[in-house]
Amino acid sequence: MGLQGKNTAEWFARGKASLVNGVSSGFRYWGDEDTLVIDHGEGAYVFDMDGNRYIDYQMGFGPVILGHGEPTVAAAVAEAAAAGTTYAMTTAGEIEAAEKVRDAVPWIDALRFTNTGTEATMHALRLARAWTGREVFVKFEGCYHGAHDYVLFTTAGAPVGSLGSRRSPVPWQASSGIPQAIRSLVRTVPFNDLDAMERLFRNEGSAIAAMLIEPMMGNCFGMMPEPGYLEGLRRLCDDYGSLLIFDEVKTGFRMALGGAQEVFGVTPDMGTFAKSMGNGFPVAAVAGRRDIMDAWAKGGVTQAGTYSGNGVAVAAAAATIDLLATGEPLARVEKVGTALMEGVASICAAQSVPVHVLGHPSMIGVFFAQDRPTDFRDTAWHDADLYEEVIAGMIGRGVMPVDDGLEPWFASAAHSDEDVATTLHAFEEALIEAKG
Ligand code: PMP
């Protein structure tokens, strides 16, 4: 593609000398000629070092629900930063932020803040293992839960052909450097396949500490659970004494104020939250039922973090949740996302391109295929080449959906009707061009 203008290319070359591949997170490296360097963001837009403006649908991989540099959150953070941030002691701001999380997500009894989603799922898994006295956990094919060893199996980067049969899935390891022993503690299962899960639980349910699931596949086209699926998982966990953990790092404070639990009406035992809780600031949480979370209070189960609950993070969370709680931002997200979903579907229909627009207005997956997918294995049907060309065409027209083919597009409260119209126009032109 060659996305870099002159200044961006110079900055990237400079960045490469000190930052490995010029990035701080592997997913941000798009190759030597396409990795952008961003100068700043403003609402729904990001600007690169050459002043090129993009309508952003990455929104930081989801967190920036209110828009880049949202002034109320920025002011709250600036005030908190000036008041000192890290004391090795609890602050009033931390308690207030925790209360706001509980008010927003009423099923939560208690929580602890962490800094990232990775940290949150790591702690949730340890707590679940400690509480149940079991070691094995269930991971759903195509879901992502962060960069720690336990969860890097059958993420959306896996070749679909490497997953074994549905009856006996083979965990695909996403990285070198993960000890072999860890592999024996994970069972991977296709999303939306309750029969497969029932079979697994019949065989070894009494050894399973937890299911860790993105209740909607926020890292795989935003695929939704089929009716009754989450209820089925809930029932199995209850029958076998396993814990149901919703990884709401993407869905929390985005699908709805109360996250996926509010939308689907199924209540997990534990949940992990991050991203939209802090509009782009590093704040996350592990939350859950009082009796489980109390395992931390009783001692013997380690949870710690120098920066957990720091002043800037909790100020960002408090300000973001206050704004989200008014209802206006998420109503806007819904309107933006619905217009995008309907627009993409009707453009594809007019161009006779088979598509399924998946997900939820807050997180949209554009899946080019005749048949509707329900799990990661079905992504084999997706016309990835067409998709890649369309995305490249959109980026060339100043619209930036996520470059990664499986990641949904993230709507924000900052996107205007005009942005949506520009986006759909760019999509239409890029699609026509890609069709040839
Ligand atoms: N869980 C989910 C569902 C995620 O999407 C992500 C990140 N994309 C994580 C966990 C990890 O969060 P972080 O990058 O903050 O460590």
Image (tube, rainbow, N blue to C red):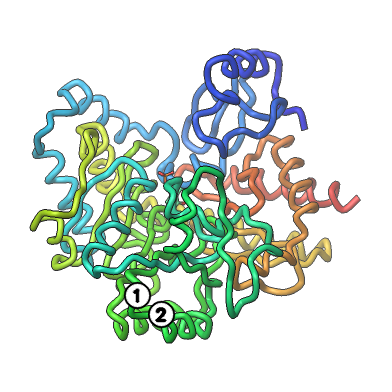
Nearer to the camera, 431 or 339 = 431
Q: Nearer the viewer, residue 12 or 182?
A: 182
The residue depicted at 9 percent of the width and 39 percent of the height is: 92
Q: Is residue 316 above or below residue 340?
A: above
Q: Residue at x 34, y 31 (%)?
A: 71
- The foreground one among 391 and 45 is 391
Disc assigned to residue 204: 2
Q: Is residue 52 above or below residue 349?
A: above
Task: List x then y, in percent, for residue 322.
Answer: 25, 47
Left or right of 398? Residue 168 is left
- The image quadrant that residue 228 belongs to is bottom left
Q: Are marks 1 and 2 in contact (CB under 8 Å)?
A: yes
Badge 2 element: helix
For mark 1, what is the residue?
207
> Residue at image x 55%, y 63%?
171
Count of numbered badges drawn on the protein: 2
Residue 58 image position (x, y, % from top left): 55, 43
Tag 2: Cα neighbours inside 10 Å, few (<14), some, or many (≥20)? Answer: few
**Ligand 1 neighbours mark 2 (CB distance < 8 Å):** no
Determine crowd level at label 1: few under 14, some 14-19, many 20+ residues with C-alpha closer than 10 A: some
Quadrant of the rendered structure where residue 55 is? top right
Specify the farthest residue to the front: 181
Quarter that holds the N terminus: top right
The answer to whether residue 412 is seen in the rendering is no
Estimate the x, y position of residue 28 in percent, counting from the top left.
57, 35
Along the horizontal axis of the image, is 191 left or right of 316?
Answer: right
Mark 2 residue type:
Glu
